[in-house]
Image (tube, helix red, strand yellow):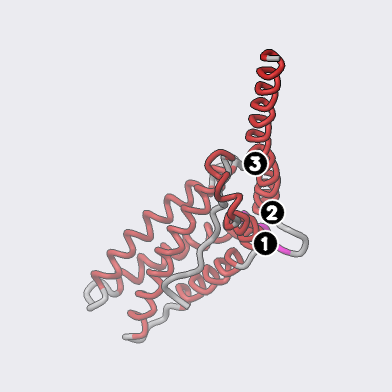
Amino acid sequence: MKKQTKGRASAIVVMLLCIAVSIPLGMHTSLDYKDNQALDTFYEGVSGETSAMDVLTANNQVGENLVRSAQVIAGDFSKSEHGDALQSQLETLKTAYLDFSEEADKSSKSRSRTEKLIESYNTFSDAAFAWIDLADTAIQSQSGDYQTYTTFRDKFTQNHDRLVGGAYNREAALYNETFDEPLVQALQPISFTEPLVTFREQEAWS
């Protein structure tokens, strides 16, 4: 009788362990599938819409031109009341662009690499819009031909809006909503899952 009792107790323990393992494992498998779908969208896009990666590549090129025009503007206004603020933000812009450009040139398509790429772009876009805000204020204070700058500004902004409202951000946002569910929150520490990084909306200029 004691052997049977011990056997049943062991079976119950094994069953409970199996359940304890299967629930977070099942959640991880399900979320991992949706995670991969979002990453596929990032690189491949959806029908009728350019992929986030292609738009990032375009803004990498536009960003380089934006930095070049920023150097001209900072020089033109170096002795004005806007000079110090422009020069300081220019240095921030250049550093952020170099970090983003380096990430954009890497070929890996892993989740960690994609997250670093988006984070570096978010930092750069924040710096870019902060620069745009300062540059527009300075340009309005005096006459001058800055059509080249405004062309790059408008193109950069247009591409940024495509990223924020694009298929990857939409799919990642839906995926991230899953983590608001109580069961997912409770099991997240042992399921090895986490929300996806998304593109941030512009903060300084509109």
The residue segment tinted magenta is 49-53
Badge 3: few (under 14), some or many (20 or more) residues near its Cα, within 10 Å? many
Residue under pointer 3: 28
Q: From the viewer's perspective, is the residue at label 1 or at label 3 nearer?
A: 3
Rendered position, 140 above or below 53:
below
Residue under pointer 1: 167
In front: 175, or 40? Answer: 175
Q: Is residue 104 left or right of residue 171?
A: left
Residue 114 in the magenta stretch? The answer is: no
Q: Position of residue 77 (x, y in %)?
A: 28, 74
State the quadrant of the N terminus. Answer: top right
CA separation in Å, label 1 and label 2 = 7 Å
Q: Position of residue 91 (x, y in %)?
A: 32, 59
- The quadrant where residue 45 appears: bottom right
The answer to whether residue 54 is visible is no
Rendered position, 190 above or below 49:
above
CB within 8 Å, label 1 to label 2 = yes
Residue under pointer 2: 41
Rendered position, 34 above or below 149:
above
CA separation in Å, label 2 and label 3 = 20 Å
Q: Main secondary structure of the magenta part?
A: loop
Secondary structure state at the residue bearing disc 3: helix
